[in-house]
Image (cartoon, rainbow, N blue to C red):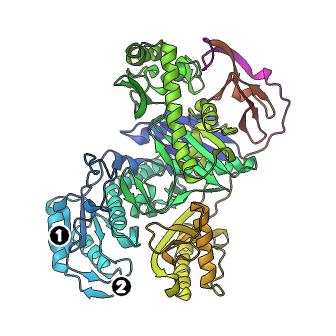
Amino acid sequence: MTYRLGVDVGGTFTDFALVDDVGDVIEAKTPSTPDNPGEAIERGLVELSNRLGRPMDSFLADCRLLIHGTTVALNALLQQKGARTGLVCTEGFRDTLEIRLGYRDRRYDFRYPPPPILVPRHLRRSVRERVDKLGRIVTPLDEDDVLRAIEVFKREQVEAVAVCLLWSFYNEEHERTIGRLVKEAMPETYLSLSVDVAPQIREYDRVSTTVLNAYVGPRLSGYLEDTERFLRELGYGGPIRYIQSNGGLAAGDVIRKRAVLAINSGPAAAPAAGVFVGAKLGADNLITMDMGGTSFDACLIDHGRPDVKGITDVHRYRLAAPMVNINTIGAGGGSIARVHQGILAVGPQSAEAYPGPACYMRGGTQPTVTDADVVLGYLNPSALLGGRFPIDHRLAEQAIADVVARPLNLSVPEAALGIFEIVNRNMANAISEISLERGYDPRDFILVAAGGQGGVHAGELSRELAIPRVIVPTFASTFCAFGALSTDVRHDYRRSFAYRLSDLDLSSLADVLRDMEQAGYADLASEGIEPEKVVVLRQLDMRYAGQVYEVQVDVSGVDWSHVDKGEIEELLHRQHEKEYTYRHQDGIGEVINATVTVIGKLPPVHLPSIEPAGADASHALSGERPMLFRGFSGYEQCPVYAGAAMQPGNRVCGPAVVEEVNTTIVMFPDFEMELTASGAFLMTRVD
């Protein structure tokens, strides 16, 4: 028997999903250890080996692929604990990081400060050189300026150097020379060149991305080295792949060089899991929600393709790299409830793994969403994780009473219900931002609920957004770890090719696309992907003259040996009309960037289907407990079902609770739920 293993290190829990040759999935979940992530990984591997009944080194030897999602790069940015970074730039462009786009994030709030600058001004060193917009060298590089900058960096003990010169994406000679000089003088320093990280037009986008790469690169590289060495010592000898922000996989060498590709590593695997689950039920319009201990992530999937953005802001820092468009807010099981100026608020602060919610008995005294769910009866009042994680119901009540109920003159159940409803409203707003605010009607989608507490809150979210159906996978609590198993190797290549359509040389554009495609095939071959397993996607960033932002136009089906400009222009019109509801028929079309995505298909995960049984689920009834729902006059005894005992075809009507080993599904009074043959729970609102 051989295995494929997915590991997702989150802020509160570290999740594991192991799938074997016949499609059986084994999950494990252990509290994260932020100061030493390897400790949590080892605990999870021990749990898996115990469930398999095999020594750890034995089952690891039979693992053919290990896929890892990590928040190390993102945490380095959020906590401002990245490397001491220096920047080399073209003379006259030293302050691009501070000028940014020339306006404030909140344009009319003059008190709103900009984000902290990642490179202080004395470590931003300019050099004399100039390349024009056609790639011609106007002013040769002054290497003495470079050497003086290096001396400053050495004196200031800089750990990483970013290099971003004007128009270097059209001629990389000067950046390569600077990179060589830096490596000769500072061989241990992490080097980030814009021609490697973001070779595309727009000065601020490039320099911000290049600096971000340098800032998080050393910490991520150190983590990868430590983790890989640690796994080898435990007995794993197979390949290790990492989740990228674009939702695909890449080898460690790729991630080390372009650390920004992993800035959103863990959550980016969720859409792949959503696509997998939806395909089993014949659905491809999905909204995935992953409610973990610290955060809530939402992503829209339109016709089986997750929304991917080429440029985005990560906690107010511009990042020009493909990233799955995931809306993340501080709304998880550990989100802290508080009273501010007489108003109840929930999150974004989190109790995280330590001390955790009050009910965890680790010294936490602040009430959290988990504490509210326990008080309302939605979660088991004595233990979580299938009884393996004891909790104290009384501590949850005490924390809510002290911090929320007494200051607001409420009873503890009323306060708990208020916490529950406010966090639900926060999550519904986050889903609206990626659906309603972008022209998508949530009623046309199915909500896929994941995370340890996604099943607790999904019913109320579907009611809030008028989403008629909810899917809760049986592996919901390890959703991203499973998503890692169902995704493929992916690389994105982008080059600026800025021309108006009237001036565009189609043969030159075809050559640029072909060069990137060949580079993609070569990179995938180095990772062991055979050519017949490669899928190629091509896109152009296009706009009408005078516009600031572009739309992504899919040109994968274009035959470049016979295409004309009218066909390209029509594709622009169609995409613009799809996104903005109108086309500027007389507008002047422009191409800004060309993008090629190569996907190396890995063997798919096959989960076995089970023959359905009858609708009666009484055999899975494990007891009952008092629960409180809005509209009830008080607590009422509601049935509790053991999810592991249910069979496909079994149906449950609310109000009720279905308890899986690592997650809980709350059935509100106007819902019914069926366990499908694919192993996912399908919840439907019946009002």
With respect to residue 394, does 366 lie above or below? below
Stretch of the chain drawn in magenta: 610-635
Q: Earlier in the sequence, mark 1 or mark 2?
A: 2
Label 2 sits on what residue type?
Gly
Residue 368, can we see it?
A: yes
Question: Who is closer to the viewer here, 86 or 90?
Answer: 90
Instruction: Assign a secondary structure to mark 2.
Output: loop
Question: Who is closer to the viewer here, 130 or 551?
Answer: 551
**Residue plotted at (26% across, 67% down):** 187
**Residue plotted at (52% across, 15% down):** 413
Answer whether residue 120 is magenta in the image. no
Res 149 label:
1
Estimate the x, y position of residue 481 in percent, counting from the top left: 56, 45
Residue reaching furthest to the right: 614
Estimate the x, y position of residue 341 in percent, counting from the top left: 34, 25
Label 1 sits on what residue type?
Ala
Question: Who is closer to the viewer here, 206 or 211?
Answer: 206
Badge 2 crowding class, 10 Å Cα cut-off, few under 14, some 14 to 19, many 20 or more, is some
**Residue plotted at (20% across, 79% down):** 128
Answer whether residue 626 is magenta in the image. yes
